Structures are given as structure tokens and as C-alpha cells.
Image: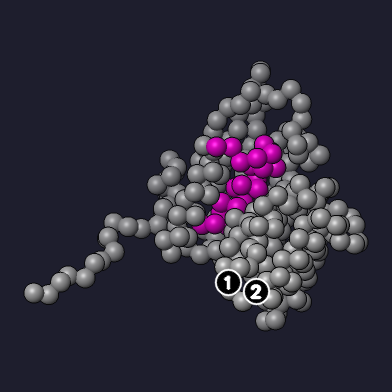
Amino acid sequence: MSQQQPRKPEEEEAIKYGDVFDVQGKLAEKPVAPKDAAMMQMAGNALLGETKKGCAAAAMVSAAMKNEKAGFVGHEDVNVDSGVTVEETQLAGKRIITESIENEVIGQYSQAAPLTSGPYSSCEQSEEDGGGGPITIGEALEATALTAGNKPVEWSDAAAIQAAEVRATGRTSIMPGGVAAAAQSAATLNARASREEEKTKLCDVLSNATERLGSDKAATRRDAEGVAVAELRNDPTLTTHPAGVSASVAAAARLNDQISK
């Protein structure tokens, strides 16, 4: 008697925006990808200072991780590359947070209005830009921990991180104990490591990048270009990782362009 080979369940498929949020049209049919989640997370962090439990960004991160683990999407995949916004509306004693993609609202909730400014109060915010401040270089580095967190740190990554640190802090030398120093140390150790599991990953270095930087600034196109050049020049194949450090800084710069319009 022959045995039937196990088959992948036909109903198993990627988690789409329509599965997670009450949206219609083309957006509903798009799988949630890591870079989509990273952009929403960066936009939320700029406004709120963190990713709130239960918010749209948190749901996107969870869905993107499951899609990637199941093989439906990869680190380089992005299905939403514009129109990601997190806006704030001030009311008496509270504020309404609205998260949107491509002009479709995917999340909305209220919070008690803070008595003091949050940890990102240095970001310029105004009624004209909807209350969302610009994405900083430090936040872009932290987003890389999501989009390429399992990637072992290489010399190209360390060079890109150093370039980002220089632009964020204005310092021309590497800060002792800073994120660039940690990246260089990781790249050195990884070059000597004999097994993949022994290597330090980007998530180990970048998860608290904003704190390690000390000072920070909004990411610009010029910053993105400088970081990309540093990563490119130090890569053996003269390429950049599609979801790596330079890609995250570029995504932050694009989001900041949207905020300023």
C-alpha cells in the first residue's frame, strides 16, 4: 500500500493587509512585508517614542515576521513604499493617533495627552505636517534590526553604521561604546568566527541604536546617499543589502520628504 505524501495545506497563504486590517481594494490583497512594517514602526516611533502594544505597527511587525518565517516574503520585500503616516489630533485631555497606508486608515486609538514632551521632542512637529515629526537616523538604524536583524555584521554594515553615526552626531571620530564601535567589533569577531551561529547579528548591535548615539537628527537624502556610498565601497561585490542599513536610512529620508510636503 502506498503512502500519501504530506502536502502543504492549500489554505495556507501569506498574511495580507485585508486579513489584519479593515481595508479594501489592492491594499487588502498585498502581503505584509518586513520593510512595510519597518516604515510604519519608524513613523510611529517618531511621534510616540515607541511602538505601542496593539497598534497597527505592532500588528504589521508580527504579520511580517510570520510571512517571512513561512517563506512568503523576504527581507528585501516591500509592498508599500509610499503614503505611510502616523498622525496626531489633539483634543481636550487626550490625543487621537491615526495610522494610515496609501490614504487608508488601518488603525486609530486615543491616549491621554502627556503633561510633558516625549523622548523625541527635539523633532520638529507642527499642525501643518499632521503632528508627525521626522524620522531620525537612530530610528532608521533600529528599524534595520527588524528588516535585516538576522544578518551577520560585515565590514560593509560597519562602514554604513559608522557613516550614519557621523551624520547623526556630527562627530568625525568613532565614539567609544557607541553603535559604530560595536559594529566594528562585531565585524572583526565575525570575520574570525568559524560557525554561523557564533556570529553577531545586526539586531544585536542596532536594537538600541538611538540610545547609543547620544545625539540624533532627522534623516535626509544626503544622509542616505552618504550611508549608501559607505556600504557600497566596503562590500566585496560593490552592492548594498536591499533591507540593510542604507536601505533603512533611505526609507526614513523618503518618509521625511512626505512629512515636509
Q: Which residues are magenta?
A: 33-53
Q: How is the image coloured?
A: one colour
Apparent side of residue 256 relative to residue 171 in the rendered image (left or right): left
Q: Relative to the observer, which residue lies in front, 16 or 198?
A: 198
* Residue 52 shown in magenta: yes
Q: Which mark is residue 22?
A: none
Mark 2–mark 1 distance (CA, rounded to whole Å): 7 Å
Amino acid type, residue under disc 1 in the picture? Glu
Dominant SS type (magenta): helix
Q: What crowding class fits label 1: few (fewer than 14 Cα within 10 Å), some (14-19), or many (20 or more)?
A: few
Q: Residue furthest bottom?
A: 237
Q: Position of residue 45 (x, y in %)?
A: 67, 42
Q: Residue at x 59, y 55 (%)?
A: 146
Q: Position of residue 82 (x, y in %)?
A: 60, 54
Q: Relative to the observer, which residue lies in front, 124 or 157?
A: 157
Q: Is residue 18 above or below residue 125?
A: below
Q: Is residue 213 above or below residue 122?
A: below
Q: Is residue 92 visible?
A: yes
Q: Secondary structure at mark 1?
A: helix
Q: Residue furthest left?
A: 1
Which residue bears the numbered disc 1?
A: 196
Q: Residue furthest right?
A: 172
Q: Residue at x 45, y 42 (%)?
A: 21
Q: Residue furthest top?
A: 92
Which residue bears the numbered disc 2?
A: 193
Q: Position of residue 125 (x, y in %)?
A: 76, 37
Badge 2 vs badge 1, beta-carbon distance below 8 Å = yes
Amino acid type, residue under disc 2 in the picture? Ala
Q: Residue at x 21, y 70 (%)?
A: 5
Q: Is residue 197 above or below residue 125?
A: below
Q: Residue 11 falls in which quadrant of the image?
A: bottom left
Q: Secondary structure at mark 2?
A: loop
